[in-house]
């Protein structure tokens, strides 16, 4: 059972804000630390078997890992590039439909260039759920409406909950043939960063709880997912503060 941790998160954020602006030498270290953690965890949630250490070697040293598939390597390199793009949009007021397509394209073009950044033209089915995703002809309208709703959603919800809702809205539209989960987590983190909150990692060990909470949103029960994400943001915020203190 997960609880609403937004009050606790904001207490930590207030403490983090006391250190801002961060020294110039700290920011690159934080970005690289979370690049490895987010890339590893987000890929692992989708079945990528590369370890966190192997992910670090691929990103930082440009080496390949014996016995691992080419696709797994592409997922690491692509996610790392999408991560850089995510950071380039941090100072924008909000994300756009083009931003979402760019995130997906950067992650996916080595795997499937034709479909990278383009909405799917075929149905998708996800094992383990009976949820029916929108049909292909509906996607452009649904994504346009999603973006149009953002200003109102940001007014209505705490920034952490807004980021979680952005994740839910996007992943339940499922606009791409593949890579929706990773794009959703990058999008969620972009929303968090734009509101001044740290990058949030969902550890692979939490995969079952994550999927269970996400599936509940298909039946209009969104609070468990909001609470789950707030717990993840809380843990990542504590780690972010620890890193800042250790670097000072």
Image: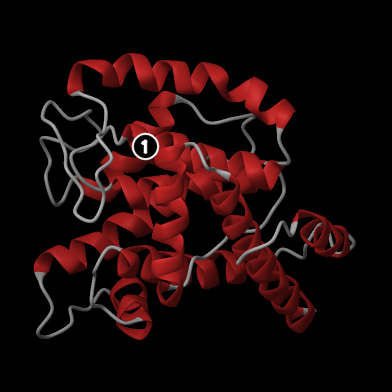
Task: Please indicate, yes or no, whether residue 199 appears anywhere in the rendered image.
Answer: no
Name the residue that disc number 1 marks: 172
User: Quarter of the image holding residue 44?
Assistant: bottom left
Residue 40 image point, x, y percent: 37, 71
Q: Is residue 71 left or right of residue 129?
A: left
Total number of numbered discs in the rendering: 1
Which residue sits at x=28%, y=49%?
107
Q: Relative to 84, does residue 203 appear above or below in the rendering?
A: below
Q: Is residue 138 left or right of residue 194?
A: left
Pick the quarter of the image with the N terminus: bottom right
- Residue 236 in sight in this render: yes
- Quarter of the picture containing the C terminus is bottom right
Instruction: Please indicate whether residue 65 sits to the left or right of residue 196 in the image.
Output: left
In percent of the image, x 72 and y 48: which residue is there? 196
Mark 1 neighbour class, 10 Å CA radius: few under 14, some 14 to 19, many 20 or more:
some
Q: Secondary structure at mark 1?
A: helix
In the displayed structure, 183 sits above or below 150; it is below
- Which x, y percent locates residue 31? 56, 64
Residue shown at 63% from the left, 39% from the top:
162
């Amino acid at each position: 059972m997960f609880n609403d941790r937004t009050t606790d998160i904001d207490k930590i954020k207030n403490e983090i804000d006391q250190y801002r602006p961060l020294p110039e030498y700290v920011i690159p270290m934080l970005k690289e630390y979370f690049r490895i953690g987010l890339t590893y965890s987000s890929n692992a949630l989708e079945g990528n078997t590369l370890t966190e250490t192997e992910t670090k070697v691929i990103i930082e040293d440009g080496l390949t890992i014996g016995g691992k598939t080419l696709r797994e390597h592409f997922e690491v390199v692509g996610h790392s590039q999408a991560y850089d793009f995510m950071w380039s949009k941090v100072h924008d007021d909000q994300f756009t439909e083009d931003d979402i397509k760019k995130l997906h394209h950067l992650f996916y073009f080595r795997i499937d260039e034709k479909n990278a950044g383009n909405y799917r033209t075929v149905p998708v089915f996800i094992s383990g759920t009976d949820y029916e995703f929108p049909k292909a002809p509906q996607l452009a309208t649904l994504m346009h409406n999603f973006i149009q709703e953002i200003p109102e959603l940001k007014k209505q919800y705490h920034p952490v909950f807004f980021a979680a809702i952005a994740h839910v809205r996007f992943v339940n539209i499922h606009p791409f043939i593949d890579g929706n989960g990773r794009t959703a987590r990058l999008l969620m983190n972009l929303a968090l960063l734009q509101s001044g909150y740290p990058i949030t990692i969902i550890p692979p060990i939490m995969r079952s709880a994550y999927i269970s909470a996400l599936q509940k949103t298909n039946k209009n029960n969104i609070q468990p997912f909001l609470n789950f994400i707030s717990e993840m943001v809380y843990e990542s915020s504590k780690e972010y503060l620890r890193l800042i203190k250790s670097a000072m």
